[in-house]
Structure formats: structure tokens, C-alpha cells
Image (spheres, grey):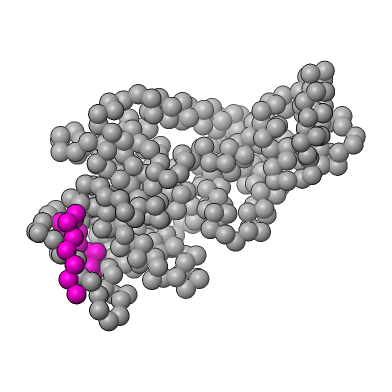
Amino acid sequence: MLEQNYRSTQNILDVANSIIKVGKKGNVKTLWTEREGGDPIFTYVAEDEEEEASFVADKINALVGEGRYKYGDFAVFYRVNAQSRAIEEAMLNEGIPYRIYGGVRFYDRKEIKDIIAYLRLIVNENDDHAFLRVVNTPPRGVGSITVGRLIEEGKKCGSLFHCARKAERSAGLKAFVSLIEELREFSRDAELEAIVRTVIEKSGYDAMLNSSKDEQSQSRLENLQELVFVAMSYRDVGKEAIQAFLDNVTLISAQDRHSSEGGDSSKGHVSLMTLHVAKGLEFPVVFLTGFENGLLPHIRSIEEGNFEEERRLCYVGVTRAKDILFLTRAETRGLFSSGFFREISPFALSIPDDKLEDLSGDFKGYAA
């Protein structure tokens, strides 16, 4: 059964057809277009997610520099929200305006801001904003009435944490004060990675998210795993490491604001989004990142028997591209805390080789 597509080039549709046909039984719609030929599908294998993100940003700037496209013509797709962190930082480093379509930026996500608030309180117990954010996060029985009394008393005793230390009536407050003091003691000579892991565990944040098996909670856990991966790059220990990290987060947030407010608005913004929100959209140039087994298809979907749903998700991503499609992957990825090579997505194995142009070497190599 043939169905005309008025958006994509024939090369892009040939790749999409090859992906979807493998999983279909019976009558399958084969897409065709009057836009014959077109560019090959470009592939790239990076050492890790940082190099993958740099490749994406470099290619975007190169194509914009040639005058062929504006920033608004580009979209970067990823399977899970946690992947956006490296891509966002690459965009900022290259001065590329971007927006998160259907979501928020990595360091603006609730779970990330919560853990950062714990870190702020560890290095500065007088940080009342951080205190108020996490005193009952995760819930530990500290209600609004108790917090209201603390705020009143805080005017007398200097800081909310100092008042909480004196509080006798609230078991929840006592538990929170003990937690922060325990974390502060642990952090004296620990590496940042261990500090962040310990905050996530001791605060009960991971237990709270693990107790819920819904997809949003799992996505938030993946974001926290990505935060731990970021912490691994810091070599200092103790408060110095925490402060260096907090300073960097502040710098990134300032760059974000500058990127959002400045730049040449006539060129638009690169759109970053998960594959789930891409349906119904179209872009001249698409980067489908994380084209790896375990990400696309996602390991959770494989385990739950939803492999074919992942195939359809991949198909949707491929068919959003009008002119140019990039398929990229990383050999190793911090999200999975593994030094093993990542296998290429099984969806790539059905793509005819003559439709691909590799920009990095053997795109289908490096089996784990």
C-alpha cells in the first residue's frame, strides 16, 4: 500500500520504510514522495555524549554559516530527558540559541533543583531559600504551620536552619537537621560524585522515586543519574568541590538567560525535544541522537515487551526530517554508569548501507 508524503526526501522515506517494515505484518504503508533522491542519511559515532553533543552543535553552526538554514530549521531529538543536559551545554558553548520543546532545561528540572538546594545547604546553613525548598522534600512530616513558625522565629535567630536546630516540638525538623549535619560531615573530604550520590540516597529522594513506577518518576531518576555523571568530572573534594559545582551551575543558568534574551531572533531557536513530543512536527534538519540499543529502543520498553512501540517512535523521529537527517550515537554514556561500548540500535540494521554516509568511521561497528 502506497502513501504519499509531501514533507521528506525519498532517501529519508526509504530509511523510514526499512525501519518500520521489519516489525510489520501484512499490509504495510510504503511512503513515497515527489522529492526524489536527496542527501544521504548522515551517521556519526562519538566517544561519549559530550563529543556527540559537540558534533551536533558544530554541524548546526556549519549549516547556518553556509546560509542554507536558520537555527529555527533544526531539531535535536532524544529518547529520554536526561540526554538534553550535554546537548544544552554544547549549544551554550557554541552560542546557539535553543529551546526545550514541551519541557524545561536540565538545571531547571525540579529534582535537579532539589538536590542542588541540598548541596547549597551543606556549604551554607544560612541559605534560607535552600532550606525552604527541601525541608519537607521528600515529605518528612514538616507541615506549613511548622515552617510558618520557623520563619517568624528566624527573624530572631539568624537563619531558619539555626532555628530548626533549636526546635524541640517537630520530629520531622529534628530528622532534617540530623540529615544535613550528617551530610555536611560526610562531605568534608569526599569527592563530589560520592557527595551527590549520598545526598540522593540519604535524603530519601531515590526511594521516593523508586516507589513509583510511572514513567515520569523513572525519567526523574535518569536526570539524577545524569547529575551524578556531571559530578564525576570534578576533582576537588569537600566543600571546595561542591562550591565549584554550584558556581558552574550558576554560570550555566546565566548563559541560559542570556541565550534566551539575546541573539539574532530572526534566525530562530534550535528545538530540543524528546521523541514522544515530536509527532506532528517537521523540521528541515533533524538530529536523532542516542541511536543506541538500550536508549532507542529504551531498555525499560524492551523489558516490558514494548519493542514495537519503540520502533514506531523511531519511525516518527526519522519522518520528522524534511531535507537532512543525522543519526548519532555514543560509544559510552554516563547515564548508564558503564565503561562498556554501547551497541548500535537494532533499528539501524535494516537500513540499506547505500542510504548512509558515515562521518566518523564504521557507524555499525563497536558491538558491546
Quarter placement of the N terminus: bottom left
* Quadrant of the rendered image containing residue 67: top left
User: What residue is shown at x 38% (from left), y 54% (from top)?
Assistant: 275
Q: Estimate the x, y position of residue 75 in percent, counting from the top left.
A: 30, 45
Residue range in magenta is: 1-18
Q: Estimate the x, y position of residue 107 in percent, counting from the top left.
A: 51, 37
* Magenta span contains residue 3: yes
Query: Looking at this view, is 203 or 142 the one in front?
Result: 142
11 vs 48: above or below: below
* Quadrant of the rendered image containing residue 95: top left
49 vs 270: above or below: below
257 vs 305: above or below: above
**The residue positioned farthest toward the bottom in the image shown:** 26
User: What residue is shown at x 21% (from left), y 47% (from top)?
Assistant: 284
Total residue callouts: 0
Q: Estimate the x, y position of residue 194 in percent, counting from the top left.
A: 62, 44
